[in-house]
Image: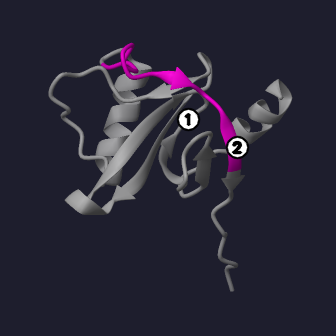
Amino acid sequence: MARLKKELLDRLKYGDKVYFEDERNGYTVMAADNRYAICTKPYNPKKTVLYTIVDQKENIRGTNNLLFNPYDYQKLNECLECLYDLRFGETKISYRNRVPLVITKTIKKCQKKEQ
């Protein structure tokens, strides 16, 4: 199981779909590096998105630890800003809202062939 998780995580790239245990719908990877991935999925009742931050090193996922969330996870540039802040310790994954990382499936974003 650990090897499967490692293989799934190694391939996370912008635009990939990620499915977590106990989640019906998949999340889309908005930003990723070798440790973190910021994933979102639509939340239609409020016309916004839900987000989760994956930490591959700690094998957890959850929301950020900031009281007033400064990031709009619908926007790519703000997801990249959050990723930068995670790398340099400006924000972390919340201790209250973290859960173990259990990925059940990933779907790669289709690459268009250049002509």
Q: Is residue 89 magenta?
A: no
Give amino acid for label 2: Thr
Q: Which residues are magenta?
A: 91-105
Q: Where does the N terminus fall, quadrant-wise?
A: top right
CA–CA distance in space, label 2 to label 1: 20 Å
Which is more N-terminal, label 1 or label 2? Answer: 1
Answer above or below: position of 48 versus 56: below
Q: Which residue occupies 43% across, 28% down?
A: 62
Q: Secondary structure at mark 1?
A: loop
Mark 2 near mark 1, Cβ–Cβ under 8 Å?
no
Q: Nearer the viewer, mark 2 or mark 1?
A: 2
Residue 33 bears which disc, if any? 1
Q: Position of residue 43 (x, y in %)?
A: 32, 57
Q: Which residue occupies 24% across, 46% down?
A: 72
Residue 104 bears which disc, if any? 2
Magenta span: chief secondary structure: loop
Q: Position of residue 108 (x, y in %)?
A: 68, 59
Q: Position of residue 36 (x, y in %)?
A: 52, 30
Q: Residue 94 is drawn in which quadrant? A: top left
- The front one of 71 and 95 is 95
Give amino acid for label 1: Asp
Q: Secondary structure at mark 2?
A: strand
Q: Residue 97 is drawn in which quadrant? A: top left
Task: Judge from the rendering whether residue 34 lies leftward or rightward of residue 67; answer left or right.
Answer: right
Q: Which residue occupies 60% across, 49% down?
A: 18
Answer above or below: position of 84 versus 39: above
